[in-house]
Image (cartoon, rainbow, N blue to C red):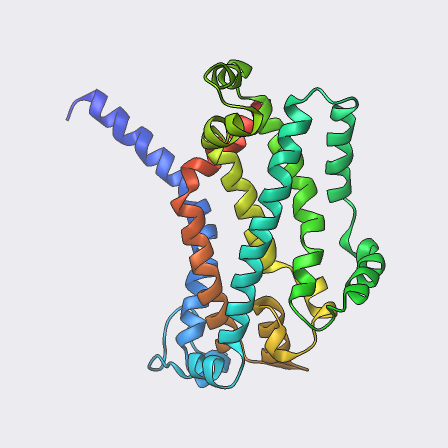
């Protein structure tokens, strides 16, 4: 084995050694959830047992409790519908707003874009009372539709600000060429601009989808009926009763909800990185 091969092996070994701690940090929570979800209660709570593996036979009892004694399936459906509605509303509002502020040379567009982003930085607890008044006026208390009204107030400002930066990275000549070919402003946006901004649109959609899956404060306050809750609120309120924690079922729910989102991020990782770098370069 010559010196060049040894140097390459040493370099790869150093790279993998440097990455190993980060891989462990990233993978360990998922591994812990998977182990805890299939452990028997006696195995979970016995302090003398080795915690990172099964000391007793695995069980599906925690998943049976989750699907038979809670509204977990209903919560998943509510959350999925909420996430779809939120993504659609966010994109329908943020795309034209971001394009107009980036391309139309509107007076004060730069300051308006900054103001939109600043509204996203306002702590949610400050907006709780005025938004409660809006939800009450619309008669949407105790329904997950209240969250369809509330959540866009967080997603639209951020996604509009983000898409402004993304639209600015596109050469103006692309749109001008579309106009020369007979496309109007709307036609140029739909046929030329949007296909080129798929990474940015994907980031906006993932941001809105993730917020719908993980937000807790407004979900727990505005929605009380058990069959109207989102999965984040429903799992926490049903499986944490005073000082009693159903750890196995909690970990099982986290595994069921978290893995699809992780796979979604992984499937579109290249687009996600491309969108972030393109927006950041503006």
Q: Position of residue 203 (x, y in %)?
A: 53, 41
Number of disc labels = 0
Name the residue at 77% across, 30% down.
112
Q: In the orientation shown, which residue stands out farthest toward the left?
A: 1
Q: In the orientation shown, which residue stands out farthest toward the front?
A: 182
Name the residue at 55% across, 21% down.
169
Name the residue at 77% across, 38% down.
118
23 displayed left or right of 7? right
Q: Position of residue 50 (x, y in %)?
A: 42, 73
Q: Quadrant of the C terminus?
A: top right
Q: Position of residue 41 (x, y in %)?
A: 46, 84
Q: Nearer the viewer, residue 174 or 54?
A: 174
Q: Position of residue 104 (x, y in %)?
A: 67, 22
- Up-down relation of residue 217 to residue 43 (above or below): above
Q: In which image quadrant can residue 27 be found?
A: bottom left
Q: Nearer the viewer, residue 141 or 139?
A: 139
Name the residue at 60% across, 33% down.
163
Q: Quadrant of the N terminus?
A: top left
Q: Nearer the viewer, residue 90 or 60?
A: 90
- Up-down relation of residue 90 to residue 38 (above or below): above
131 displayed left or right of 214? right
């Amino acid at each position: 084995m010559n010196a060049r091969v040894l140097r390459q092996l040493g370099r790869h070994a150093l790279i993998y050694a440097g990455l190993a701690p980060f891989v462990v940090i990233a993978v360990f929570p998922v591994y812990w959830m998977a182990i805890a979800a299939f452990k028997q209660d006696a195995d979970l709570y016995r302090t003398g047992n080795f915690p990172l593996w099964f000391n007793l036979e695995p069980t599906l009892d925690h998943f049976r409790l989750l699907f038979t004694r809670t509204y977990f399936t209903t919560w998943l459906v509510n959350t999925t519908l909420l996430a779809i509605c939120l993504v659609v509303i966010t994109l329908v509002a943020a795309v034209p707003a971001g394009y107009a502020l980036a391309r139309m040379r509107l007076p004060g567009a730069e300051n308006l874009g900054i103001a939109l982003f600043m509204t996203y930085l306002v702590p949610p607890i400050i907006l709780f009372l005025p938004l409660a008044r809006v939800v009450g006026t619309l008669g949407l208390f105790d329904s997950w539709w209240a969250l369809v009204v509330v959540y866009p107030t967080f997603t639209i400002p951020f996604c509009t600000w983000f898409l402004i930066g993304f639209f600015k990275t596109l050469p103006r000549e692309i749109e001008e060429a579309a106009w020369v070919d007979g496309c109007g402003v709307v036609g140029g946006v739909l046929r030329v601009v949007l296909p080129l901004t798929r990474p940015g649109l994907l980031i906006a959609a993932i941001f809105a989808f993730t917020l719908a899956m993980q937000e807790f404060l407004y979900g727990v306050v505005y929605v009380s009926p058990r069959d109207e809750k989102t999965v984040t609120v429903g799992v926490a309120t049903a499986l944490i009763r005073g000082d009693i924690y159903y750890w196995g079922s909690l970990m099982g729910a986290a595994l069921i909800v978290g893995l699809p989102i992780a796979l979604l991020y992984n499937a579109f990782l290249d687009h996600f990185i491309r969108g972030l770098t393109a927006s950041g370069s503006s």
